[in-house]
Image (cartoon, helix red, strand yellow):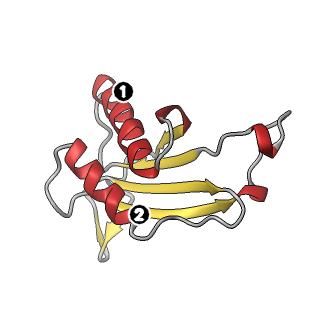
Amino acid sequence: MPIVDIKLVLRKDASPRPRLARAIADAVGAALHLPPGRVWVRVSAIAEQDYAENGTSEAETDTPVFVSVLHAVLPPQPALQTEASVLASTIAGVVGTGANLVHIEYAPPGKGRIAFGGILLE
């Protein structure tokens, strides 16, 4: 597992490309050397007017990609840093943006607080 939630800030009249979640899931699975069925990806969009950076205009702001990653157990810090770098470059490549615009947040570990099919992850 990880569960990867991606929020794209989209310019006016833009929409995520078809099957983007599948492309990201496959790319992340390959980059992290995970077997099939172990990476879950959800993609959603944030309209440009619903995103802002202080002191800037929409025209001068590059559109970021926000990523949240949930693991059952967080990897140790050095491995987490490596993973963050790999995820940023992998997701950027699929989405078509720079890795510097991919912002990753790691959620607290899911073990003991997430249930799959009603069964708590232990």
Q: Is residue 14 left or right of 5 when viewed as pictured?
A: right
Residue 62 appears at what percent x and percent y? Answer: 66, 40
Occupied quadrant, residue 78: top left
Q: Is residue 59 above or below residue 100?
A: below
Q: Is residue 20 above or below residue 33?
A: below
Q: Earlier in the sequence, mark 1 or mark 2?
A: 2
Q: Amino acid at mark 2?
A: Leu
Occupied quadrant, residue 119: bottom left
The one nearer the camera, 82 or 73, is 82
Residue in the image at 57% along x and 55% along y: 8
Q: Which residue is mark 2?
A: 20
Q: Secondary structure at mark 1?
A: helix
Nearer to us of marks 1 and 2 is 2
Occupied quadrant, residue 11: bottom right
Q: Amino acid at mark 1?
A: Gln
Q: Which residue is mark 1?
A: 81
Residue 28 appears at what percent x and percent y? Answer: 29, 49
Residue 121 can be seen in this image:
yes
